[in-house]
Every structure is written in C-alpha cells, then in structure tokens.
Amino acid sequence: QAQLVESGGGLVQAGGSLRLSCAPSGRISSINVMGWYRQAPGKQRELVAGITSGGRTNYADSVKDRFIISRDNAKNTVYLQMNSLKPEDSAVYYCNVVVLGPVRDDYWGQGTQVTVSS
C-alpha cells in the first residue's frame, strides 16, 4: 500500500514561516480530499486544513488567515504554507489523503514535527 511522505517541518521562531509538503510514495488513484492534521502533546489530533479535488478549502478557526493549503493534482501533492507562526502551533503535523470509493480509504503520513519558539 502506498504511503505518504511529509517534509518541511522544523524549528522556527514565533512570527516565522514554514512550508509543509506531502506526496505519496506509491500510486494512489482517485484522491478526493487532502488535508493536514496536527497533534500536540496531551491533546487530540485536530484538523488544520483540508482541500477537495475541486479546490474547495476549509481551515480550523485558529489558523485562518495565517495558513494556506494547496495541492498539485498532477503530482498528488499537498502543501501547507504556515505564516505568522505562534508557539501554540507547535505539534506533530500529519498529512491525510482520502479516497472515496465503494468504501472510504484513509492514508496517513508518519508526521513531521513543527516547533515554534517564543
């Protein structure tokens, strides 16, 4: 089964920017929704942003106007541009891909650490 490979995490100062990327290591057909989730220590995993195959986006209230999600359908790649980062954005960020067929198939990346220092 294909896996998702993330890149772009790291350590940044508050107010800085990072860009995350995620692409499958193998073939995944008919991707519907691509998105990013995050999980901070002691907290539940939460949706950060999602984008449909048609380009419709949704964002968590906490990241609206700071983060931008985009995708390259030809490359099956999803990006998350994170601007004006805050310490509370620190978490492990996970890429998610959803294929909607007779059954729903979810693919997850291994996670990439984002740490924002104050």
Image: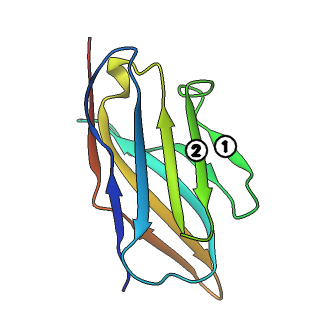
In the figure, residue 115 lies in which quadrant? top left
Q: Residue furthest front?
A: 74
Left or right of residue 54, residue 101 in this image: left
Which residue carries the number 2 mark? Answer: 69
Circle 2 residues within 10 Å: few <14, some 14–19, many ≥20: many
- Is disc 2 placed on a helix, strand or loop? strand
Residue 26 location (% of width, % of height): 40, 82
Mark 2–mark 1 CB contact (< 8 Å): no
Left or right of residue 76, residue 117 in this image: left
Which residue carries the number 1 mark? Answer: 58
Query: What residue is drawn where x is 64% and y is 53%?
Result: 51
Q: Amino acid at mark 1?
A: Asn
Measure the alpha-carbon separation of dots 2 and 1: 9 Å
Instruction: Specify the color scheme.
Output: rainbow
Left or right of residue 116, residue 55 in this image: right
- Image quadrant where one finds the N terminus: bottom left
Vertical position of residue 9 compared to residue 83: above or below: below
How many numbered discs sit on the rendered protein?
2
In the figure, residue 33 lies in which quadrant? bottom right
Circle 1 residues within 10 Å: few <14, some 14–19, many ≥20: some
Of the residues tagged 2 and 1, which is closer to the observer? Answer: 2
Query: What residue is drawn where x is 56% and y is 69%?
Result: 98
- Is disc 1 placed on a helix, strand or loop? strand
**Which residue is more in the foreground, 110 or 15?**
15
Vertical position of residue 42 compared to residue 22: above or below: above
Residue 101 location (% of width, % of height): 65, 84
Residue 41 location (% of width, % of height): 23, 36
Residue 47 location (% of width, % of height): 50, 45
Vertical position of residue 57 compared to residue 41: above or below: below
Q: Amino acid at mark 2?
A: Ile
Query: What residue is drawn where x is 38% and y is 20%?
Result: 16
